[in-house]
Image: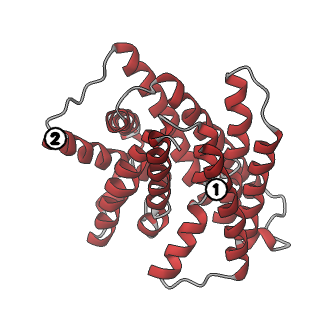
């Protein structure tokens, strides 16, 4: 395996591990999706600025075109975050998760289309298998009444699919438009535009009422699972295809369930282990393919 591929895969797995901690730190913070996205962006920007100043590295991008491309990708990412949280807030975590993790299927169709190629049947099957595994994992997906068509369910599915599409577009374009820009610098400027655009929509009253425990969670959320995790993800996209990143990145729900079991002592059912094993098998298959 080429050295850069080996490093990219290790970086991607570490990113997935950190991103799977999202629920541990965001859980219990009484803020809406927009406020949470804005605050995590600001904290991530500050963390990356400190990191670059310590290392005495430049914070600027090579050209004006790179700024435009990076900020465009940042807007896509911000919209993905908002719709990601909103999908689960308006319906349920189960419905939102299944809809959002349709993004591997979208990616395996979108990426070849941009390259004027046909998607591989094996990739589409792998994406559908991931979606099956996620569907098995979430408890409500096996409940007869939970998928009953109603306004909140349809809204949750719709927002989840929009979030999945936005994430797929952003990851696919990331590797095409700004592939040679440093991952941390790219992430910093993407977080910056998200934080600036969302300032008018923050619920400042709710933010002022956060407890010390909430602020600590928010700090870790912004530094670890936003600044560090997404910088690692962007770094992986410089060497791996968006399709590979999507397939392997779907180990986040199984890892999140495992961490919740180990850290929060949450109950994990057999269906979670079974669904997680399906998702993990696809991730390992894609890892082998990426070699």
In the image, what residue occupies the spot 60% across and 52% down?
248
Observer able to see residue 143: yes
Q: Residue 127 in the image: x percent, y percent?
A: 74, 49
Q: Earlier in the sequence, mark 1 or mark 2?
A: 2
Is disc 1 surrounded by few (<14), some (14 to 19) or many (20+) residues within 10 Å? many
Q: Residue 167 in the image: x percent, y percent?
A: 58, 40
Say which of 92 and 200 sits in front: 92
In the image, what residue occupies the spot 37% across and 36% down?
183
Say which of 135 and 197 sits in front: 135
In the image, what residue occupies the spot 73% across and 44% down?
105
Judge depth for marks 1 and 2 and give the one in front.
Answer: 1
Is disc 2 surrounded by few (<14), some (14 to 19) or many (20+) residues within 10 Å? few
Q: Residue 190 in the image: x percent, y percent?
A: 39, 34
Q: Residue 265 in the image: x percent, y percent?
A: 50, 85
Judged left or right of residue 137, residue 122 is: right
Q: Give how far apart the Cα atoms at labels 1 and 2 are.
A: 34 Å
Describe the element under mark 2 as helix, strand or loop. Answer: loop
Judged left or right of residue 271, residue 71 is: left
Location of residue 39 with respect to 121 vertically, above or below? below
Q: Quadrant of residue 181?
A: top left
Numbered mark located on residue 3 in the image: none
Numbered mark located on residue 55 in the image: 2
Judged left or right of residue 16, residue 231 is: left
Q: Mark 1 — residue?
A: 283
Say which of 4 and 34 sits in front: 4
Q: Quadrant of residue 115?
A: top right
In the image, what residue occupies the spot 64% across and 56% down?
283
Quadrant where the C terminus lies? top right
For the rendered model, the colour scheme is: secondary structure
Q: Find the residue positioned furthest to the top.
A: 64
Location of residue 168 with respect to 176 vertically, above or below? below
């Amino acid at each position: 395996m080429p050295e850069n591929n080996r490093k990219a895969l290790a970086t991607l797995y570490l990113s997935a591990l950190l991103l799977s901690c999202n629920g541990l730190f965001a859980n219990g913070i009484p803020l809406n999706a927009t406020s949470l996205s804005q605050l995590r962006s600001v904290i991530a920007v500050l963390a990356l600025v400190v990191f670059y100043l310590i290392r005495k590295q430049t914070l600027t991008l090579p050209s004006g075109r790179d700024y435009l491309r990076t900020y465009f990708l940042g807007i896509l990412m911000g919209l993905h975050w908002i719709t990601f949280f909103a999908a689960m807030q308006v319906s349920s975590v189960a419905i939102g998760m299944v809809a959002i993790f349709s993004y591997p299927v979208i990616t395996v169709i979108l990426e070849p289309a941009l390259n004027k190629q046909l998607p591989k049947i094996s990739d589409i099957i792998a994406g559908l298998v991931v979606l099956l595994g996620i569907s098995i994992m979430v408890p409500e997906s096996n409940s007869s009444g939970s998928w009953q068509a109603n306004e909140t369910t349809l809204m949750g599915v719709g927002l989840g699919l929009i979030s999945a599409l936005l994430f797929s577009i952003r990851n696919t374009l990331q590797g095409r438009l700004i592939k040679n820009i440093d991952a941390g610098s790219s992430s910093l400027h993407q977080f910056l535009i998200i934080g600036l655009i969302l300032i008018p929509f923050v619920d400042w009253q709710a933010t002022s009422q956060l407890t010390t425990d909430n602020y600590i969670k928010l700090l870790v959320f912004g530094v670890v699972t936003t600044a560090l995790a997404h910088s690692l993800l962007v770094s992986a996209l410089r060497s791996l295809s968006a399709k590979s990143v999507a397939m392997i990145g779907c180990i986040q729900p199984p890892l999140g369930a495992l961490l919740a079991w180990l850290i929060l002592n949450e109950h994990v059912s057999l269906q979670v282990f079974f669904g997680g094993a399906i998702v993990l098998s696809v991730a390992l298959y894609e890892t082998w393919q990426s070699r």
